[in-house]
Image (spheres, rainbow, N blue to C red):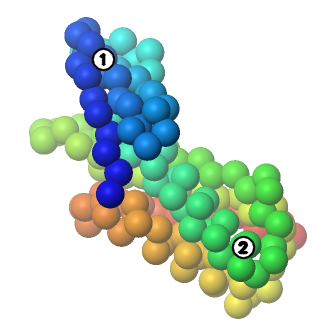
């Protein structure tokens, strides 16, 4: 169990403290929803969580297999719905792998990405297309 404490600071800004580490993150409402957009929005953090979760789960697999994936890059593009209710509609994810792997190992990496807890936790209405880019 992990506790996160949040404080509303006014002006559509929140401060979140990760209690086990004391690390602090601020959020702002996005510009397209009455905010300043000076920090990650709450839905930006969802996109960030998806990408970092996929990287972490792939990294766990890589450590087990002895693969060096340092330099792996992940890009998540968040799109919101254009009609109410406001929610995340799509999280287009691209993953650039730093090493070439055989077909079986590639399949293991792709399965790992799709089994990350954040991916598994998102509502089925959120589209999550994932593209892997492998070196030649």
Q: Which residue is under mark 2? A: 62
Q: Quadrant location of residue 98?
A: bottom right
Give me the disc on residue 104.
Answer: none
Mark with earlier residue (2, 1): 1
Q: Which residue is under mark 1? A: 13
Residue sitting nearer the eye, 56 or 94:
56
Residue sitting nearer the eye, 92 or 114:
114
Pointer 1: residues within 10 angstroms few (<14), some, or many (20+)? some
Seen in the picture, residue 50 relative to 24 is either above or below; the reply is below
Q: Quadrant location of residue 16?
A: top left
**Residue at the image position 45 percent from the left and 49 percent from the top:** 49
Q: CA distance from mark 2 to mark 1?
A: 38 Å
As drawn, is 78 to the left or to the right of 112? left
**Residue at the image position 63 percent from the left and 83 percent from the top:** 108
Q: Position of residue 40 (x, y in %)?
A: 43, 28
Residue 40 visible in the snapshot: no
Residue sitting nearer the eye, 81 or 124:
124
């Amino acid at each position: 169990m992990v506790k996160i404490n949040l404080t509303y600071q006014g002006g559509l800004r929140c401060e979140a403290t990760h209690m086990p580490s004391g690390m602090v993150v601020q959020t702002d409402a996005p510009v397209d929803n009455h905010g300043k957009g000076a920090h990650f929005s709450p839905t930006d953090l969802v996109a960030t969580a998806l990408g970092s979760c996929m990287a972490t789960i792939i990294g766990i697999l890589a450590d087990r297999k002895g693969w060096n994936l340092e330099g792996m890059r992940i890009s998540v593009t968040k799109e919101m719905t254009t009609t109410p209710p406001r929610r995340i509609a799509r999280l287009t994810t691209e993953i650039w792998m730093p090493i070439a792997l055989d077909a079986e190992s590639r399949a293991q990496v792709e399965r790992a990405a799709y089994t990350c807890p954040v991916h598994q936790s998102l509502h089925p209405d959120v589209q999550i297309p994932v593209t892997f880019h492998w070196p030649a």
